[in-house]
Image (cartoon, helix red, strand yellow):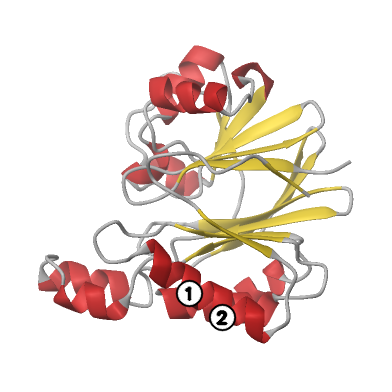
Amino acid sequence: MGLTYCLLASGSKGNAVYVAAGPTAILVDCGLSARELLRRLDSCGLAAASLKAILITHEHRDHMAGVRVLAKNLRLPVLATRATWAACGDMQATRHQAFAAGEVFSLGGLQVQSFSTPHDAVDSVGLVISAGAARLGLCTDLGQALGLIERRLMGCQGLILESNHDPELLAQGPYPPWLKQRVRSRHGHLSNQQGAELLGKVHHPELSQVTMAHLSQTNNRPELAAQAAGQALAGLGSRASLTLARQDAPTAVMEL
C-alpha cells in the first residue's frame, strides 16, 4: 500500500496537509477556514468524506485556525499532545485524542511516528507517516535540525521540509527587531540554507519526492528556496523531484 499526499496550503497564513493510504485519510494541521479547506480538497479531487482525523503539530494559529469548525462539521477526532491541546483554547465539544511526543500510533492503514521539534510552541512535533514501505517525513516550524530529527527523517521516500526565509531578506525586511530575532532563533524557523543542509543530511538513493514548505511571503522568494534545495540535490546526484509548496494554492497530489 502506498501513500498519497497533498499540501493544501503552506506558509504563515495557513497550513494543511492531506495524507492518505487506501480508505484512510488524515489532515495534518488546519490553518485555513473550514470552507477554504473543503474548497481546496475538492479542487484537488480529494474527498473530505475520506478524512478520519485531524492531527495538530502545534497550537499556532496558522496550523489550527480552522480545526474546531472542520472537526465539528465532519465529526472528526482531533489528535494533539495534551500540552498542545490545552494551548489551543476553547475547542468546545471537539473530540480530543491525546498522544505524547515520541509516540508511535496507528490511524487505520497509517502508522504515525511523532517526534519533538525545537519551536516556540508548547510541545511541537514533526511526523513520519508510513503505510507499508512508503514513508513520508513532515518537519516544518523548527529553529534547528537536531540529531533526533535527522534520525527520524532517515529513509523517507517523501520529505516535507522547511525553507522559511532568506537571512538577508529577513534582515532588511519590515519585521520589528524582536520578530526577526524570533524567526532566526533556535526555536524559530529554518532558513533556505538550513533547510537545504537538512535535506543533504537525510538524503538517500530511494528519496523520490522533496517539498520545501512554509516559505515566508515577506522574507523569502520561491526562486531562492528552489536554488538552495536544488543545489543540495544536484550535489548529491539525486533523482528526487523538487516541489515548492505555496500559500495560495495546493500542490499537485503526490504518491509514494
Q: Is residue 256 above or below residue 225?
A: above
Helix, strand, or loop for circle 2? helix
Which residue has dot 2 on it? 231
Residue located at (39% from left, 59% from top): 215
Residue located at (25% from left, 80% from top): 168
Picture coordinates of residue 204, whole percent (x, y): 77, 75
> CA separation, marks 1 and 2?
6 Å
Label pair 1/2, CB-CB below 8 angstroms: yes
Helix, strand, or loop for circle 1? helix
Picture coordinates of residue 3, whole percent (x, y): 77, 43
Which of the two residues, 94 or 169, is positioned nearer the viewer here? 169
Q: Amino acid at mark 1?
A: Gln
Answer with left or right where residue 79 lies relative to residue 23. Answer: left
Q: Is residue 38 above or below residue 237?
A: above
Binning the other alpha carbons within 10 Å of mark 1 as few (below 14), some (14 to 19) or many (20 upward) gives some
Which residue has dot 1 on it? 227
